[in-house]
């Protein structure tokens, strides 16, 4: 999905569209007021995305049926794609998935009005910046061989269970799993630290994410100035080459700054 947001004032007609009583207003995030949503921008359930403005800020919204349950994978993808496409063009404060208010007036009364200055300040801080995520996953065979070559106990346990029935070596297999998991955790901490040391100087802020998979090697979120994106990409490529065959390293972004925004107005 290729939604985009342009930094050109849009017509007020978007905000005067009457609200059907069977609809509520889904809020994706907060942007500066002087943006325009492209006509083909779509959100949850394929609904057109519009703006609700107040002062110097605006909310990205679409209408959803009141009786429609939210939470499908498609809904989450639509939410993220809209925000990430927006972040590639302008500052955006992402709201949590599923933020719904009664109608557009409620967006002003409950969100944009009470938190106007807070949101405006945060948007100013994000100007010219975006989030990037560095994610690496160990090659299972490569990391296991590392552990067996480096850890005496793991190698001994491997030899102890080799060629023997599973039932007869149950305790040894359990212990081997524990040793391997501990060793991989130590490697994850060391590898994450190495990448963080390299990338932190290129970033405004960094967050170490919790592993989402047992073979996760690195999972970092970085808030980066737009003019340093090239340096970031080069540094990640260097590590990708260094760890080829051991860790598959990927750089994702620009993304909405999910890891760096905590909005007081997210309780919709």
Image (spheres, rainbow, N blue to C red):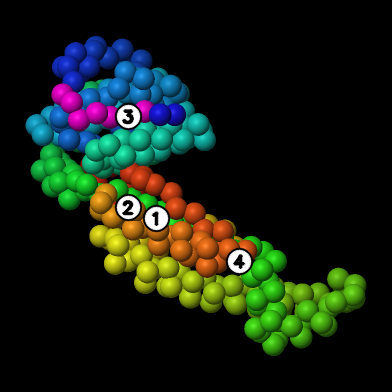
Secondary structure beneath label 4: loop
- The residue to which callout 1 is attached is 233
Marks 4 and 3 sit apart, C-alpha to C-alpha, by: 37 Å
Q: Nearer the viewer, mark 3 or mark 1?
A: 1
Residue 52, compared with residue 98, is above or below; it is above
Mark seen at residue 246: 4
User: Start and end of the magenta stretch?
Assistant: 3-9
Q: Main secondary structure of the magenta part?
A: loop
Residue at coordinates 10% horizontally, 43% vertically from top-left?
A: 117
N-term mark: 3 or 1: 3
Marks 2 and 1 sit apart, C-alpha to C-alpha, by: 6 Å
Q: Give the percent coordinates (x, y) of residue 155.
A: 74, 83
- The residue to which callout 2 is attached is 229
Q: Point out the image quarter for the C terminus.
A: top left
- The residue to which callout 3 is attached is 4
Residue at coordinates 49% horizontally, 71% vertically from top-left?
A: 191
N-term mark: 1 or 4: 1
- Is the residue marked by circle 3 packed among few (<14), some (14-19), or many (20+) residues within 10 Å? many
Asked whether the residues under the numbered discs 2 and 1 touch, taking CB atoms below 8 Å apart as contact, a structural biologist would say yes
Secondary structure beneath label 2: helix
Q: Give the percent coordinates (x, y) of residue 113.
A: 13, 35
Q: Quadrant of residue 138?
A: bottom right
For this rendering, which residue is in front, 62 or 266? 62
Q: Give the percent coordinates (x, y) of residue 253.
A: 39, 47
Q: Quadrant of residue 19?
A: top left
Residue 258, compared with residue 109, is above or below; it is below
For this rendering, which residue is in front, 93 or 70? 93
Residue at coordinates 46% horizontally, 35% vertically from top-left?
A: 77
N-term mark: 4 or 3: 3
Marks 3 and 2 sit apart, C-alpha to C-alpha, by: 20 Å
Judge from the rendering whether residue 52 lies leftward or rightward of residue 206; answer left or right. left
């Amino acid at each position: 999905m290729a939604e985009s947001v342009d930094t050109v004032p849009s017509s007020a007609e978007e905000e005067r569209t009457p609200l059907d009583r069977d609809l509520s207003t889904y809020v994706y995030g907060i942007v500066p007021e002087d943006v325009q949503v492209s006509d083909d921008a779509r959100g949850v359930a394929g609904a057109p995305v519009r703006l609700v403005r107040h002062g110097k800020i605006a909310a990205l919204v679409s209408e959803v049926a009141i009786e429609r349950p939210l939470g499908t994978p498609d809904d989450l993808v639509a939410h993220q794609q809209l925000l990430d496409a927006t972040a590639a063009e302008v500052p955006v404060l992402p709201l949590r998935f599923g933020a719904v208010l009664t109608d557009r007036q409620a967006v002003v009364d409950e969100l944009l009005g009470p938190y106007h200055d807070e949101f405006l300040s945060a948007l100013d801080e994000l100007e010219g910046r975006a989030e990037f995520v560095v994610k690496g996953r160990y090659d299972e065979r490569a990391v296991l061989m590392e552990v067996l070559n480096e850890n005496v106990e793991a190698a001994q346990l491997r030899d102890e269970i080799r060629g023997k029935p599973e039932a007869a070596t149950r305790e040894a297999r359990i212990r081997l799993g524990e040793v391997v998991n501990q060793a991989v955790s130590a490697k994850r901490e060391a590898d994450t630290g190495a990448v963080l040391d390299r990338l932190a100087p290129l970033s405004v802020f960094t967050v170490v994410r919790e592993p989402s998979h047992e073979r996760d090697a690195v999972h970092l979120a970085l808030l980066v100035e737009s003019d340093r994106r090239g340096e970031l990409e080069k540094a990640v490529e260097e590590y990708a080459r260094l760890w080829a065959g051991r860790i598959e390293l990927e750089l994702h972004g620009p993304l909405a700054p999910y890891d760096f925004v905590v909005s007081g107005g997210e309780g919709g």
